[in-house]
Amino acid sequence: MRGRGGAAGARPARRPAAVRRRGGFLAGPPGENRLRRLYEQARRTWDRPLTAYYLILGSALLITVLGLVMVYSASMIKALELSLPASYFFRKQFVAAVIGTALLLAASRMPAKLHRALAYPLLAVTVFLMVLVQIPGIGVAIGGNQNWISLGGPFMLQPSEFGKLALVLWGADLLARKQDKRLLTQWKHMLVPLVPVAFLLLGLIMLGGDMGTAILLTAILFGLLWLAGAPTRLFAGVLGFAAFVGFVLIGNNANRMSRLACTGATDLGPKGECWQAVHGIYALASGGLFGSGLGASVEKWGQLPEPHTDFIFAITGEELGLAGTLSVLALFAALGYAGIRVAGRTEDPFVRYAAGGVTTWITAQAVVNIGAVLGLLPIAGVPLPLFSYGGSSLLPTMFAVGLLIAFAREDPAAKAALAMRRTVLGKRAGVRWKTMRRRVKKRPSGER
């Protein structure tokens, strides 16, 4: 007799190894299985409760350490031009990094209630200092912008940098309290007093002429409104008003118009007005794949203005090449992703608004700085966060990173994982101590 599959007594054909069933599913080639296992393992690792915690801590510290290295390399020639020691700017940045690390650790250990309690005092002190900046004899003008207060000696303070942190904390606390009272469904409660206070800060900043910090403060305001669920019409209205004011302020200032005209420029211009923008592109282009080597930049020898502040990314590209700049971009991308993850997974409205505001702040500042160096955006004069020289920028940014770390630790799953890890480490330490005690031989009585 003939069976269903062919001649009588014929054995059924064996499937190839590549399509045999394993666990009820058709298995692919061995290489595909290995890739699938690696993908599943990476996905499980990415979804662990402590992933955001480690990403924030690791990426922020790596950016800061790499920034210290590049500040030293990029500022040596500038310091020597000013008849200062070659490590002058590096030493100041290192001191700021040490103080910032202390602030980061303190912020990471503070509960959310204490952060909320700091919101109003920080806002009041910041507004007071920003008013002092505009008083003749107290405020100091640098580069045409009067945004500084002298602290004595070489130390200066820029209060507007702390205005970003103040707006994030105060705005997050305000929106959280209004959400608890179910008031955010009314547009007037969503806008007032958040938008008027933000415009107050913007006005004080613009009195000093700092357009770059004003742009970042506006980005933080829009980020908070977006997280609060502002309607599209309301959001578009505020955005349109801010854009109109920005165009008016830019059009009435020749320096800002010149910066706008130099966006994407490849020529220095008849009077050299695009010198900084063009030489930033030269620095990036001459770096190649792996750069000319740490400390071997040519543009920092007086060709590129502000090599250790606004255009430190260009020096990084020249000395470390495409590999170095992509590494910096990857670290900022990891920090931004972790901040979004913290804001998206929490049920506490204050944590969501504060984490979203900090992430918007750091990401927008990085985009504005790097976009200007690449010639994609106008030069706004803002430093690369955690990377460029400047203690007034580094201190509030590191405190903000500490906020993200604290919020990542407060996630219930992360808190349980940390508690379990402490328990396991404690047990291991106890077992090791008991083992060491057993190995110690008891000495006879009377023996010294």
Image (cartoon, helix red, strand yellow):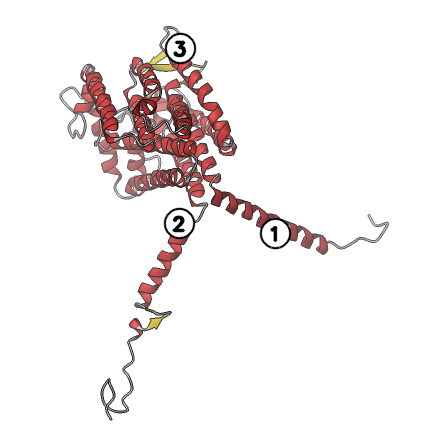
The residue at 47%/26% (across/down) is 116
Pick whichever of labels 2 and 1 is earlier in the sequence.
2
Q: Secondary structure at mark 2?
A: helix
The Cα–Cα distance between marks 2 and 3, rounded to whole angstroms, is 47 Å
Q: Does residue 73 appear in the picture of this structure? A: no
Residue at 48% from the left image edge and 45% from the top image edge = 413
Q: Say which residue label 1 marks.
A: 428
Question: Is residue 195 rendered to the left or right of residue 429?
Answer: left
For the view shown, which residue lies furthest in the right direction?
Answer: 446
**Neighbour tally class for label 3: few under 14, some 14-19, many 20 plus, Cα within 10 Å:** some
Give the labeled residue for mark 2: 46
Judging depth in this view, the residue of 49 and 214 nearest the camera is 49
Real-space Cα distance between discs 2 and 1? 27 Å
Alpha carbons under labels 3 and 1: distance apart: 56 Å
Q: Mark 3 or 1 closer to N-term?
A: 3
Mark number, residue 132: 3
The amino acid sitting under disc 3 is Leu
Identify the amino acid type marked 2.
Trp
Quarter of the rendering occupied by the N terminus: bottom left
| Residue 209, numbered label | none
Choose between 146 and 22: the one closer to the eye. Answer: 22
Graded by Cα atoms within 10 Å as few (under 14), some (14 to 19) or many (20 or more), the crowding at tag 2 reads few
Q: Position of residue 154 (x, y in %)?
A: 43, 17
Residue 128 visible in the snapshot:
yes
